[in-house]
Amino acid sequence: MERRVPDLWFTEYQTPNLRLGLRIKDVLLNKRSSYQHILVVDTMEYGRVLVLDGAIQLTEKDEFCYHEMMAHLLLCAHPNPEEVLVIGGGDGGVVREVLKHETVKKVTLVDIDEEVIKASKTFFPAVSCALDDKCVEIRPMDALLFVKGHFNEFDVVIIDSTDPVDFARGLFEPAFFKDVYVALKEEGMMVAQTESPFSEPDLLRDAVRGLRMAFEKVFLAWGVVPTYPTGLWTYAIGSKKLDPRMQKRPAPQRTKYYSDAMHSLAFELPPFINEIINGGNLEEAKGD
Ligand code: SAM
């Protein structure tokens, strides 16, 4: 008789009417921290998966698609990135990618929930591998408070936060973008994950609008992340001076999604995304 695979599934409701199901082999962690519910499941097709408050944060199979773009879009567009701030990102995936750049002297990781860092170190060693690097300083606190205390300090700020609810909501607000602006050096740039244009068009539009209230130049890039809602993701960029579309440094070694060609491609906005953020005015979309 054929061995029956248990019919166990993890389901993420990406919208009230759209869900993604992953058949699972095992539940590895199922706990509530002081901030959120933390789940780690081992799936049949996407390896281990980190879930916070019911939303997929990363899967072993496709996390590189996201973490590489969040790090290299700006680090390859900056002439000499030395001081990097990662907000959220407690799984360590962005930090791992940032440290592929030899110019980087220090990465400060500010995640409000230490339990996420611990869970990633336990269950996702290939993702969290750089968190113990001597260049990394981990500050387990609210980034909304952390950023206010810093001025003219960072070359690049990467906002790798959970969806804009509860304690993450403020990370998508113009006031926070203005605080990030102050924390950045003269040629500083920031990037934030700004969700899917299919499932969160209003959030995307509002985030870009908020960035325009804080930064001289605002750009949008996009990419593919299969297990994020709808699989198409966006990266909104605020820059004081530099144009992030112009690579200053080549793609680092050992990337699987990001490349020199993908850097240029990421800023070519499909008309429907341009419509969301600019009502169709292509020039404005390009940050010119
Ligand atoms: N790549 C994922 C995504 O795009 O949804 C995000 C991954 S990372 C695990 C998200 C992190 O943001 C969580 O660990 C959470 O604790 C952190 N976070 C949310 N709000 C925060 C805040 N106000 N300050 C610092 N960290 C925050």
Image (tube, helix red, strand yellow):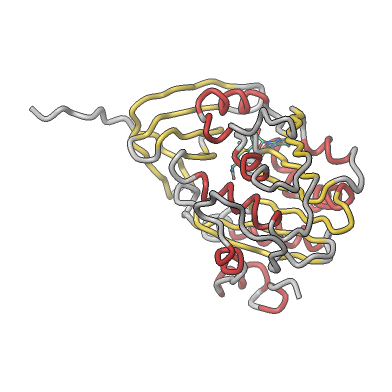
Residue at position x 88%, y 52% in the image? 185
Q: Position of residue 213 (x, y in %)?
A: 83, 61
Of 268 and 84, the residue lying toward us: 84
Residue for point 59% across, 70% down: 269
Question: Is residue 277 depicted above or below 170 in this figure?
Answer: below
Residue 271 vs residue 168: left or right?
Answer: left
Residue found at the very far left of the displayed protein: 1
Q: Quadrant location of residue 138? A: top right
Residue visible at 79% across and 61% down in the picture: 239
Instruction: Identify the image quadrant of the C terminus.
Output: bottom right
From the viewer's side, name the closer residue of 31 and 206: 31
Residue at horizontal 77%, vertical 44%?
84
Give the percent coordinates (x, y) of residue 1: 7, 27
Q: 278 or 127: nearer the eye?
A: 127
Residue 156 point in image, percent of width and height: 77, 50
* Picture coordinates of residue 44, whole percent (x, y): 33, 35
Pick the front one: 222 or 197: 222
Residue 85 horizontal side relative to residue 198, left or right? right
Q: Quadrant of residue 241?
A: bottom right
Q: How many marks?
A: 0
Report ligand 1 position as a quadrant: top right
**The image quarter in which residue 57 lies:** top right
